[in-house]
């Protein structure tokens, strides 16, 4: 059995019967789309790595601590479409879902977030669809991150496709909180998800955010003393 057939079989086994119409052709279409989004992630990740390498040699530091990537599996895509009452087709997925391809960029400092976003968006072939700044305006639960929904060209053998991807840019501290909050929020039984727990998570988010600002201020005191970060966001680009 070849790899593609094995992969298709595993997806078929993981899906509830009848979710995907047209059988194997539809599965193959989802697999081809998955490859398209994987290619988009590689394009964006390479751009980020090049920027990070440049800073290493020109600024003697790296503004990116870590890059994580993922593409939603065909099963996850179909489940999300079904929850939204949309047809379980590749066309519906590409038209309605902006987070099939996801890239998480983790930076040491708050300033690095805005620097990386600015430099990436200034590239000619990156198109910005939506920018949501949850650092300046955190979510009610305390979540902080900069979200960018972008398009990037993927060059195939017979055509060029513009593919959508969601990029989340956050600090190490923001990622620490978001990872544990997700584990707690989704791992707890329903009866344990009380307002007291939610309030404690928000309080932890605020403490971590305050530490982020202090670390940025400390960095600026050492490296760029002319910059004032005491209000928490004036230091950002």
Image (cartoon, rainbow, N blue to C red):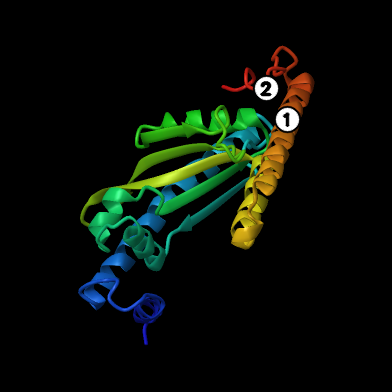
**Residue occupying the point 58% across, 35% down:** 54
In the picture as drawn, the residue positioned furthest to the bottom comes out as 1
Quadrant housing the N terminus: bottom left
* Dot 2 alpha-carbon crowd within 10 angstroms: few under 14, some 14 to 19, many 20 or more: some
**Residue 156 visible somewhere in the drawing:** no
Q: CA distance from mark 2 to mark 1?
A: 8 Å
Nearest the eye: 102 or 35: 102
Q: Are marks 2 and 1 in contact (CB under 8 Å)?
A: yes
Nearest the eye: 132 or 16: 16
Nearest the eye: 196 or 202: 196
Q: Is residue 178 left or right of residue 92?
A: right
Number of marks in the rendered image: 2
**Residue occupying the point 65% across, 37% down:** 62
In the picture as drawn, the residue positioned furthest to the top comes out as 226
- Image coordinates of residue 87 in percent, x first then y, are 24, 61
Q: Is residue 13 above or below residue 168?
A: below
- Image coordinates of residue 29 in percent, x first then y, are 26, 67
**Residue for badge 2:** 232
Quadrant housing the C terminus: top right
Q: Secondary structure at mark 1?
A: helix
**Residue occupying the point 60% across, 22% down:** 236
Q: Secondary structure at mark 2?
A: loop
**Residue 67 visible somewhere in the drawing:** yes
- Image coordinates of residue 161 in percent, x first then y, are 27, 49
* Dot 1 alpha-carbon crowd within 10 angstroms: few under 14, some 14 to 19, many 20 or more: few
Q: Quadrant of residue 88?
A: bottom left
**Residue occupying the point 78% across, 25% down:** 218
Disc on the earlier residue, 2 or 1: 1
Q: Is residue 188 left or right of residue 104?
A: right
**Residue for badge 1:** 210
Q: Is residue 137 left or right of residue 158?
A: right
- Image coordinates of residue 10 in percent, x first then y, are 41, 79
């Amino acid at each position: 059995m070849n790899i593609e057939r094995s992969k298709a079989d595993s997806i078929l086994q993981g899906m509830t019967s009848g979710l995907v119409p047209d059988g194997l052709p539809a599965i193959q279409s989802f697999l081809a789309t998955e490859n398209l989004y994987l290619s988009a992630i590689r394009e964006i990740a390479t751009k980020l790595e090049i920027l990070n390498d440049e800073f290493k040699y020109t600024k003697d530091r790296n503004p990116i601590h870590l890059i994580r990537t993922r593409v939603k599996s065909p099963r996850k895509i179909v489940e999300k479409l079904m929850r939204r009452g949309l047809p379980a087709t590749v066309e519906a997925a590409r038209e309605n879902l902006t987070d099939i391809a996801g890239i998480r960029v983790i930076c040491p400092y708050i300033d690095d977030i805005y620097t990386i976003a600015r430099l990436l968006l200034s590239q000619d072939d990156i198109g910005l669809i939506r920018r949501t700044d949850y650092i300046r305006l955190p979510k009610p639960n305390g979540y902080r991150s900069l979200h960018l929904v972008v398009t990037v060209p993927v060059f195939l053998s017979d055509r060029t496709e513009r593919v959508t991807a969601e990029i989340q840019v956050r600090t190490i501290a923001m990622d620490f909180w978001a990872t544990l909050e997700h584990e707690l929020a989704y791992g707890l039984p329903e009866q344990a998800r009380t307002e007291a727990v939610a309030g404690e998570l928000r309080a932890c988010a605020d403490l971590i955010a305050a530490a982020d600002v202090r670390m940025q201020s400390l960095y600026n005191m050492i490296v760029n003393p002319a910059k004032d970060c005491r209000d928490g966001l004036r230091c950002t680009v």
